[in-house]
Amino acid sequence: MRTIKAQDVVDAVAKMCISANRYLPADVRKRFDECEAQEDSPAAKEVFRQIKENYELAEKTGIPLCQDTGLAVYFVEMGEDLRIDGMNIKDAIDEGTRKGYKEGFLRKSSCDPLTRKNVGDNTPSVIHLDVVPGDKLKITFMAKGGGSENMSRVTMLAPAQGWEGIKKFVIERVAEAGPNPCPPTMVGIGVGGTFEYSAILAKKSLMRKVGDKNPDPKLAELEAELMEDLNKLGVGPMGLGGKTTVFDVKIEMRPCHIASLPLAVNIQCHSARHEEVEL
Amino acid sequence: MAEYKIETPLTDDDMVKLKAGDVVKLTGTIYTARDAAHKKLCDLLDEGKELPFDLKGAAIYYVGPSPAPEGRPIGAAGPTTSYRMDSYAPRLHSLGLKASIGKGKRNDEVKKALKDYKAVYFGATGGAGALLSMCIKEAEVIAFDELGPEAVRKLTVEDFPLLVINDSHGGELYAVPDRKAAGL
């Protein structure tokens, strides 16, 4: 049994919160260069120019990329041969969120759903924990902004609706969202599981690297097909028209009940902030 | 599409000349207010009390900035999605508000209010929080401090880059999604 100190988890998480909010990942930057090159309209090109200037400025000054530094969402893989000394894993991650959001001058956006009173330290974090073989701890972090999250939906389709039904729902959702979620967006799609599991799958898919292909060739094909259709909507960067409405589409799938076809669409704004650490 | 430099307070003449798609560099004083602050502003109006700032000729920026790091007046300060303020905006326009600044679509009631009261809806680039913060020279909380990031702030801006999304003549800039081309 391997043991690591809780404080090491706290510090690693805090560091990740700060750096992810300042540095747009290389996979996202690379994709934006490709998208900018395919745009003809001056408005679309101008949006990409501003996105680029923004991430260069954030990197140089330490000012966050976006004022919405998100709710802190984590996917955690904890080895079954690992023990955290001094704190429970979820408490350690929450403590890391508290520390990171305070020390990094990040906005605290967590509030009571009804009174709307701000909690003040951006907790509780949203933590999805998996126990896996081995003695390592892998934590993937995402700063999830509210504007794009609000445009996300979960639905229960009839099994007969199949792939065509899934496609229609996703396209209609992106069309309806229009300029609201800060396009170009990344669209995460969870198919199958149960009502709540489809949403977790959709969120998890957003943690994948931009530009990577689904390891399942059939799903890789569906991702490409859907991305092509979504970009025909012409919503464009910030809704001003153009060829890039979405910059990536990810699908995660899992078996479901014979009576059901759960579907979740989780929308990610262009500031696709994510980072990973292994302890 | 024209480019204008405009200073606050905003006048009817300033607003009427603007058309959807125009580029505006705004200089002067603007006020921040988003979800919870809008509710409080309207509660004050219901109670017949004075607002923390004069709405006549004013511009409201829908933003909840991140905390100011050392040496800066404000942290990242890009626009938040505007539709959540739609239920409050027409009332504020009727009392003299000339412009709101945000991102995303507005409803028909807001668009009608822009026509009725000679006002406009400006878009700023969503997510460009670091970039936009550079145009903010001063920031001071003037009301509802308890709301934290949602408090009302008085900002002094210089050449703040905006696009006219909805003008006072019914014009709109946003692209209409081509559902047919996408296979719907």
Image (cartoon, rainbow, N blue to C red):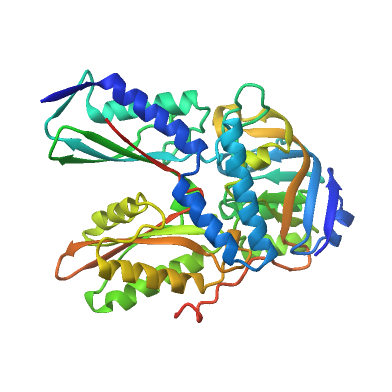
Image vertical order of residue A119 relative to residue B64, above or below: above
Q: Residue at x 50, y 27 (%)?
A: A104
**Residue A239 screen position, x and y as percent:** 59, 63
Quarter location, residue B36: top right
Residue furthest to the right in view is B13
Q: Residue at x 30, y 19 (%)?
A: A7
Image vertical order of residue A130 relative to residue B52, above or below: below
Left or right: where A19 falls relative to A76: right
On the question of residue A164 being in view, the answer is yes
**Residue A31 screen position, x and y as percent:** 49, 56
Quarter location, residue B152: top right
* Quadrant that contains the C terminus of chain B: bottom left
Q: Residue at x 44, y 57 (%)?
A: A186
Pick the front one: B42 or B174: B174
**Residue B87 screen position, x and y as percent:** 60, 54
Pick the front one: B132 or B13: B132
On the question of residue A181 being in view, the answer is no
**Residue A167 screen position, x and y as percent:** 37, 73
* Quadrant that contains the N terminus of chain B: bottom right
Left or right: where A275 falls relative to B24: left
Image vertical order of residue A207 relative to residue B48, above or below: below
Left or right: where B35 falls relative to A149: right
Pick the front one: A4 or A187: A4
Q: Residue at x 41, y 28 (%)?
A: A15
